[in-house]
Amino acid sequence: MLIAETGGLNAMIVDSTALAEQAVRDIVASAFQSAGQRCSALRMLYVQKDVEPHMLVMLKGALAAMRIGDPWSMTTDIGPVIDAEAQQGIADYCRKLEGEGRLIASLDAPSDGRFVAPHIFRVKGIEELEREIFGPVLHVATFEADEIDKVISAINRTGYGLTFGLHTRIDARVQHVIDRVHAGNIYVNRNQIGAVVGSQPFGGEGLSGTGPKAGGPHYLRRFRKSATRPKTAEPAAEVSLTTLRDHMPDARKGNWSTRPDRIAVLRKHLRGRAGEAIAAAASLEYGQVDLPGPTGEGNALSLGPRGRVLCLGPSEDALLAQVVQALAAGNAVLAVAPRANAILKPLTGKGLPLAALGGHVTPLDLIDLDADLVASTADDTTLRSIRQALAQKSGPIVPLVTEAIYPAAYAHERSVCVDTTAAGGNASLLAAAE
């Protein structure tokens, strides 16, 4: 079992209602603690234009107060980077941006040792970051009050989704952002590093991870493999890549992913069929589940749809179980298997984001098919071909689910941590926002 996390272009948004002192404290910790050598570290800061001048003055002051040196010393804030190669690469990047006139503030680093001075640079937005700079480097951009959705879209377009931070005093904005940001771990009014096992299950989405979260209620299940009997598919015609693309349903159809009655709808249409799969899906809580944590901190875990799921059966029972679990998690589903239309007749044509095609998929076509997860309980030879094809895809890793009953595998886990003690901010703006 592999649980991997692959870094990210982690962002934070600070709006005009945020308490500047708390925001600056958390920005500095998130960007520069451990010399920025955390996969969860803050790389891209968006500050609402109204408060940018004040925020930058405070940020420069906080940076100037930091000390670089021996990490064994209690007075040291920033230690060295991991090796000479990292030191050289980060320093070269900083020189390049400084030469372009983007420098906002920096410190001097000791001449001896593998130290890199912390730097803050101005950029237009996250789209200018071509890669993650794994060191004490922070990029800052501004946004207008009515542009927050554009900022969120830009962050999502990077394809990364490990951590995200938000500083605001408007509860409605918190929910608005949480509902739209594609990140595995979201932190509100606190820093975005140092996830705690059991409180903030850790792991990213998209280019930032394989999906499973470490340290959460679904963690140990990831290491267990159920005994299954692989099935050999019946002879069937090949379904072309063009046909697969044309029939992949729209995940937004009928707002299926946000409906609270998904399992009830499936039960109604199936009339007792796929009972084990429905029961397994019903045992999961897809909404927010509170997790333990210290006083003054709220932690919650939710399960969200992965997006587009390709279910390949190949047996009747396996295909129906796969489709039920994928739909229960809010996904759009394309089912391809011999007799798929007959097997899924109770569910097709009912307004669900589901399409069924009779036949089989050529594994190599998976390389160019836009799917976020594939499910199959086929024989070992077929599964090996599917894995090899998925490994050749560019972009995020696409998981392959080979167990007949495993409803949590069809969902993303998202962790939200809120500092519930945070108070203050711009009172006049808060009043106007109500």
Image: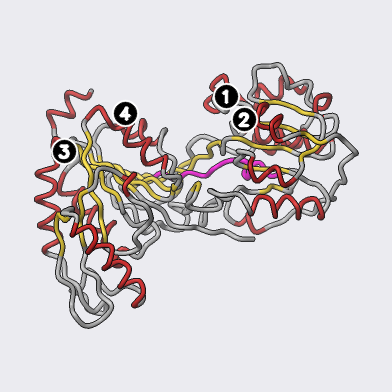
- The image shows residue 112, relative to residue 184, as above or below, that is below
* Point 68% across, 36% down: residue: 325
Q: Is residue 235 left or right of residue 361?
A: right
Residue count near mark 3 (Cα–Cα under 10 Å), binned few <14, some 14–19, many ≥20 = some
Q: Which disc, if any, is residue 72?
A: none
Of the two numbered discs 4 and 1 in the rendering, the one whose residue sits closer to the viewer: 1
Residue count near mark 4 (Cα–Cα under 10 Å), binned few <14, some 14–19, many ≥20 = few
Task: Please name the amino acid that badge 3 sits on.
Answer: Gly
Magenta-highlighted residues: 406-416
Q: What residue sits right under mark 1 in the picture? A: 256
Cα distance in 3D space between marks 2 and 3: 41 Å
Q: Which disc, if any, is residue 332?
A: 2
Q: Is residue 29 left or right of residue 134?
A: left
- The image shows residue 380, relative to residue 34, as above or below, that is above
Image quarter where the C terminus lies is top left
* Point 65% across, 17% down: residue: 351
